[in-house]
Image (cartoon, rainbow, N blue to C red):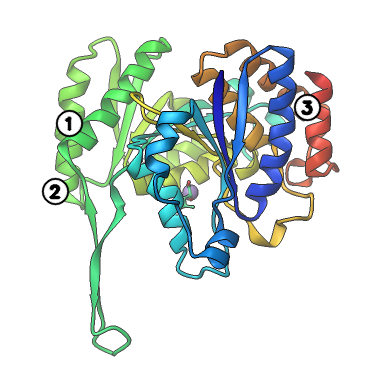
Amino acid sequence: MKPIAVIPGDGIGVDVTRECMRVLKRVNEKFACALEFVEFDWSADKYLKEGVTLPAGALDFLPKDFSAILFGAIGDPRVPDNRHAADILLGMRFGLDLYANVRPVRLLHEKLCPLKNVRVQDVNFTVMRENTEGAYVNAGGVFKKGTADEVATQEEIHTRKGVERIIVYAFEHAKKHGLSKVCMSDKSNVMLYAGGLWQRCFKEVSARYPEIKPNHLYVDALTLIMVRKPTEFQVIVTNNMFGDIVTDLAAALQGGLGMAASGNINPNGISLFEPVHGSAPPMAGKNISNPMGSILTAAMMLDHLGLHDPAAAIEKAVAACVEADQTTVDIGGTLGTHEVADAVIARL
Ligand code: IPM
Ligand code: MN
């Protein structure tokens, strides 16, 4: 048995996960995947009712009792400081050491790309975002808060171990998939200390992979080239914050946030899979959000679990729905969230 912890979260995370689960249950039967699902209601609702964010013991029982985690989205305006999101999502990223945030960028149909004259094969790369340190550790402080003399500091933490392992992960991915180059992106012309560490690690690690060409771009230049010439990229490795930003841009190349999938990977433990989009509170409960990001994320999870045929079947079904305009409004169709899932299931 492969038990999966399902955490829909907030907003449209609930809507897309509900539909994604119908697709998953269909492939589970059809391919006899032996998946079992246990749902957890960790969310703003639970926090507001019970004061609980990430329940005690979660970081122990998740890796012990489950093969993977399927996540929806988190964030709710009723929790203005986003405390529950920090505890639940970042709590699992940090606490389960999910250090590689793997965000594939693939165009399923050229009509989804906002760029001119782009073919599907022109947008096909993976961003490896460091996922356990950088700006996300939220180090810093505030002094004289609320006064005219207020001072705020926000620090980034970059460790030798943390930087090296994500760069190794990127090169290993390139090697495994027969790719020829890895691009590291930072802002080492300004952020000299962290940038210096990233530069030195990249140089050292790349020397161990002579068959793979290392390349470097400052992150501002990276965004320019990503729009102008996406064919340039195979694997991009970058820090937590830059990875967050460039993967929204990269999502646009694929048809928007509704199409982007991701995995938060611990290569030595349990991993968590989540669509790149957020909880989009104004869209919640209206049957309008695009479930394809979540469904493609589920395919990524299956692939990670060694279930390659069902993963490929889901991807093929989604691509066929896109081709036939059986999609939500954000990518040009007329269907609702539920009806898109119906269309995917019908093709499985
Ligand atoms: C993402 C999201 C999260 C992040 C938020 C919800 C904390 O934007 O997964 O990209 O910034 O990492
Ligand atoms: Mn983001």
Tag 2: amino acid:
Tyr
- Distance from Cα at disc 2 to Cα at disc 1: 13 Å
The reply to whether dot 3 and dot 1 touch (C-beta < 8 Å) is no
Q: Which label sits on residue 236?
A: none
Q: Is residue 112 above or below residue 78?
A: above
The reply to whether dot 3 and dot 2 touch (C-beta < 8 Å) is no
Mark 2, residues whose alpha carbon is within 10 Å: few (<14), some, or many (≥20)? few
- Distance from Cα at disc 3 to Cα at disc 2: 48 Å
Q: Which label sits on residue 344?
A: 3
Q: Which label sits on residue 193?
A: 2
Q: Secondary structure at mark 1?
A: helix
Q: Is residue 119 above or below residue 243?
A: above
Tag 3: amino acid:
Val
| Horizontal and vertical percent position of residue 163 | 23, 36
Q: Secondary structure at mark 3?
A: helix
| Horizontal and vertical percent position of residue 22 | 74, 32
- The residue labelled by disc 1 is 201
